[in-house]
Structure formats: structure tokens, C-alpha cells
Amino acid sequence: MAEQVNITIADSTAQVNISVESGGGVSKHSELTLDDGTNPHGTTKTDVGLSNILNVDLTPAVDLNTAKVGITTAQASDITANNSKISYTDSSAVSLNTAKIGITSTQASDITSNNAKVSYTDSVAVALNTAKISYAVNPFTGLTDATNISWDTRDNDNATVLLAGNRTLDNPTNLINGKSYNLIVRQDATGSRTLAYGGAFIWSDGTVPTLSTGANEIDVFTFIYDGSKLYGSLIKNFS
């Protein structure tokens, strides 16, 4: 049987709604107020016969239900332990967690220190940071004139040679499939020097080209490598 009891405390009235089970024990309460919203006499729940009612924290932290969100207990613990470490405002960058994204501290520092160097608006183009972009253009390098001329293309995909006699150009080394190579061949002051070629060189119509013969004349070869052969073409008689 439920009863409503009005209790008068000094000059304030507290209205208490109490449900009483058989035996007189208090099972629950729904409301306890003072008419002026204050507790001027320091009244406690024991003072008004409500000592059986437990205090309850109405704002506990919500535990992550790992079974519902598909994460492990360890992952839930990691999220809980680190939730205060991530902050966001419109003007604050989130720190990079190197352990989580697989980069080194140095790389993270480089990203952080350079993030202010790239800016974008609808009307401003992003400038290229040339210090961060690497590219290589190999200048022409002189080959050593000899009876058999060697050409290492590792750092010399553009080369020149001055012929002082009849020579053979051996198969180049360190070629890369799909890459092109250029060779400038110069006659010396005598001229009429000839050039033979290694077996990797092949030519249009199967015809081996003949060099210009005049003194100091220049011929320019271009070769394309397919992984086994060098396909060559010749532009003659620059002077």
C-alpha cells in the first residue's frame, strides 16, 4: 500500500512521496523538496526517516561495450586512457600519433614543421616546395676514347665521345628497360673516323649507319632500350 506523507521541518515543509511495502520498509522514493528550495537547517535523509534510501550518482561515465562496437577490451582501455590526449578546436592541429599511423618521430616532425608551408584558398594556387621535390636531369658526360669505348649508363644516360681513331662502341652497362639514351659522337680534326657497335644495338632496316666524315663534324644518336636491345637512330652532320 502506497502512502503520501507530509513532514514539517521547522519553518519549511518537505513533501515526501514514499512507497511502503508490507513490513513498513521503504522501497523507493520519488521526490523530496523543501517549499523554498533550500535546506536551511542542514536536514539529512536520516532526520526525516529516509536512511534506507541510497544516494545515487546520476552522472556516471559510460563504459564502452566492446561487444557492441566491435573492439577488444584492450582497445577500449586504450581509447579511455587516451581520450584526454586528443583535442580539437578550429585553430589547433591534432598531434600525430606516430605509433598508430606507422611513421617515425622524425617524419612526424617534418610533417608538423611544414604544414604551415602549404596553404589553399579558392583564389590562391598552392606553391611547389622545391626543397621537398627531388628530380634529376643528367647532363652530358664525356666517355673515354679508346679502341673499345665503354658506356656505363648508371649516371650517364647522356654521353659524348670524341673519336681520334676507328672505334667500337661496346654494349652499354646498367641499362633500364623503357629508358632512352643519347650519345653525341664528334670527329676529331682529322675526320673520317668510323664506329662499330656491340651486338645489343639494332637499326632501322637492319642497316648500320655510317658516321659523318668531315673534320670536327658531329652526329647524334638516340637509343631506346626494351630490356634486351637498343633501338638506335642517327641524326648526322652537325657542325
Image (cartoon, rainbow, N blue to C red):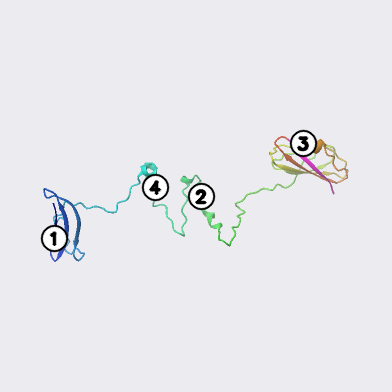
Q: Nearer the viewer, mark 1 or mark 2?
A: 1
Left or right, residue 83 beside residue 33: right
- Cβ atoms under marks 1 and 2 closer than 8 Å: no
Amino acid type for the residue under numbered disc 2: Ala
Can residue 44 be seen by looking at this rendering? no
Residue 209 image offset from top left, x and y in percent: 83, 39
Disc 2 versus disc 3: distance between alpha carbons?
49 Å
Disc 1 versus disc 2: distance between alpha carbons?
67 Å
Which of the 4 image quarters holds residue 174?
top right
Q: For mark 4, what is the residue?
A: 79
Dot 1 or dot 3: first in sequence order is 1
Residue 190 image offset from top left, x and y in percent: 88, 43
Q: Classify 10 Å Cα crowding around label 4: few (below 14), some (14-19), many (20 and above).
A: few
Question: Which contiguous range is marked in magenta?
Answer: 229-239
User: Quick one: SS at disc 4?
Assistant: helix
Dot 4 or dot 3: first in sequence order is 4
Dot 1 or dot 4: first in sequence order is 1
Q: Main secondary structure of the magenta part?
A: strand
Amino acid type for the residue under numbered disc 1: Asn
User: Quick one: SS at disc 2?
Assistant: helix
Residue 201, labelled with which disc? Answer: 3
- Cβ atoms under marks 1 and 4 closer than 8 Å: no
Which of the 4 image quarters holds residue 75?
top left
Dot 2 or dot 3: first in sequence order is 2
Residue 108, labelled with which disc? Answer: 2
Q: For mark 1, what is the residue?
A: 6
